[in-house]
Amino acid sequence: MNAPARLDTTPRLEDFPFRLSDNVRFGDLDPNQHVNNAVYATYFETGRVTLMKLPEYGLTPPGLAWIMVRLDIHFRAELHWPNTIELGLGVVKLGRTSVTFEQVVFSNGKCIASATSVGVLLDEAAGAADPRGDREVQPLAQARHRGRAAGYPSYLETIRPDVPASPRPARRGRRRP
């Protein structure tokens, strides 16, 4: 029996509603004269933090902070200096205290790297996760990843088909008050 055909999993920049441009810096290079793998985490951070901190979105109310708890990066091509990059970000899941993003780095029309990241809203005084209210949900819903909305699988779903795309099953056992 043949394996089912896989959908093209190469991200398209137009599927990411939140975008910004940046420059590749000389300091981003490794001894091989291409962007060091660790720098991509900074590129993805720039996209997330810019979205979360922009006052017009109101995603970080006073006393709360977004922290990243997971980052899975797929390196797709080399990137060199000098160059410019386009960062794309889209929401793929809104949880009770978390948001899952898909992010991309493009240069010259080519996807250089993609990532799935999870951020949690933290109550700074309590030092614990804080359930988001409607005020934080609405702007994030507007940043919904368009490819996902159209039924395309996420990168994580294509490499880990055992990971359900639907919300997690209910937790068993006691819940904290």
Image (cartoon, grey):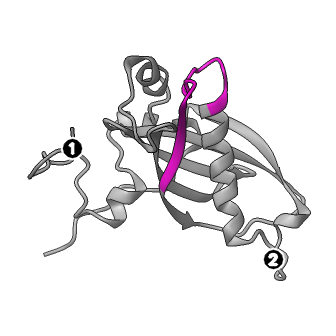
Q: Is residue 23 above or below residue 81?
A: above
Q: Quadrant of the C terminus?
A: top left
Q: What type is the residue that disc 2 sits on?
A: Asp
Q: What type is the residue that disc 1 sits on?
A: Arg
- Between circles 2 and 1, the one closer to the viewer is 1
- Is the residue marked by circle 2 packed among few (<14), some (14-19), or many (20+) residues within 10 Å? some
Which residue in the rendered view is the most extreme toward the front? 125
Query: Which is nearer the eye, 118 or 1?
Result: 118
Query: Which is nearer the eye, 127 or 36?
Result: 127
In the rendered structure, find residue 176 and report the number of the disc placed on it: 1
Side (left or right) of 123 relative to 65 = left
* Residue 100 shows in the view: no
Side (left or right) of 147 relative to 166 = right
Which residue in the rendered view is the most extreme toward the bottom? 31
Residue drawn 56% across the image and 31% down it: 17
Check disc 2 and report the residue beneath it.
30
Q: Is 161 one of the magenta-colored residues? A: no
Magenta stretch, residue numbers: 53-69
Rendered location of residue 59, percent (x, y): 54, 26
Query: Which is nearer the eye, 62 or 67?
Result: 62
Q: Is residue 132 above or below residue 20?
A: above
Disc 2 is placed on an element classified as loop
Residue drawn 59% across the image and 33% down it: 52
What is the distance, in whole Å, between disc 2 and disc 1 at their CAs? 46 Å
